[in-house]
Image (cartoon, rainbow, N blue to C red):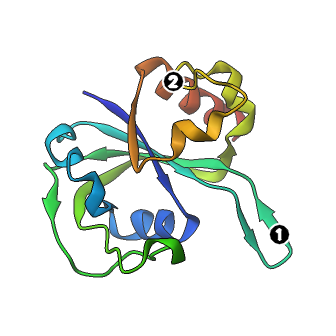
Amino acid sequence: MTYWIASSNRANAKILEQKHIWGVPKRNKNLMHRVKAGDTILVYTRQEKEDDIIHPPAITGAYEVVADPFEDYTRIFTTPPHMGDEVFPYRMKVRPVAVFAEPLEFKPLILDLAFITNKKMWSGHLRQAMREIPAEDYHLILRRAREEV
């Protein structure tokens, strides 16, 4: 089993939560060969401003990939303005493992996460659609989420 952290906006994290499908952009086709049924994905949402509210970067939950990835060009995800007509065609069906009632703020985790090797420039570690993370980081995040419940 491989653990992944997937970067998203809040709109697409909600779509994942509702439809149990995760998608990555065309430029990430290589993930089709790396992600397998049984892998687990943590969903990271970037900082976003909504009206006068600033939502901090956070982890919203964990999902298990239940089937090997597939290709589908049906538009179901919200495309950020800088990504043109991207439809996130490389997709995987998932089931919830732990959906957090409240998102777990990400910044307090940074010092304790092994996959973030540059603690000052940490956001660079989350600029790709999905990246593999150590099992210890996955379990640390789940523990912290449970402690805050």
Residue 98 visible in rendering? no
Disc 1 is placed on an element classified as: strand
Provide the residue designation for mark 1: 53
* Amino acid type of the residue tagged 1 in the rendering: Ile
Marks 2/1: CA–CA distance: 29 Å
Q: Residues within 10 Å of mark 1 (few under 14, many from 20)?
A: few
Q: Nearer the viewer, residue 61 or 36?
A: 36
Q: Quadrant of residue 50?
A: bottom right
Provide the residue designation for mark 2: 115
- Number of labelled discs? 2
Placement of 3 over or under 26, stated as above or below: above
Disc 2 is placed on an element classified as: loop
Q: Quadrant of the C terminus?
A: top right
**Residue 141 x %, y %:** 57, 31
Q: Quadrant of residue 49?
A: bottom right
Q: Residues within 10 Å of mark 2 (few under 14, many from 20)?
A: some
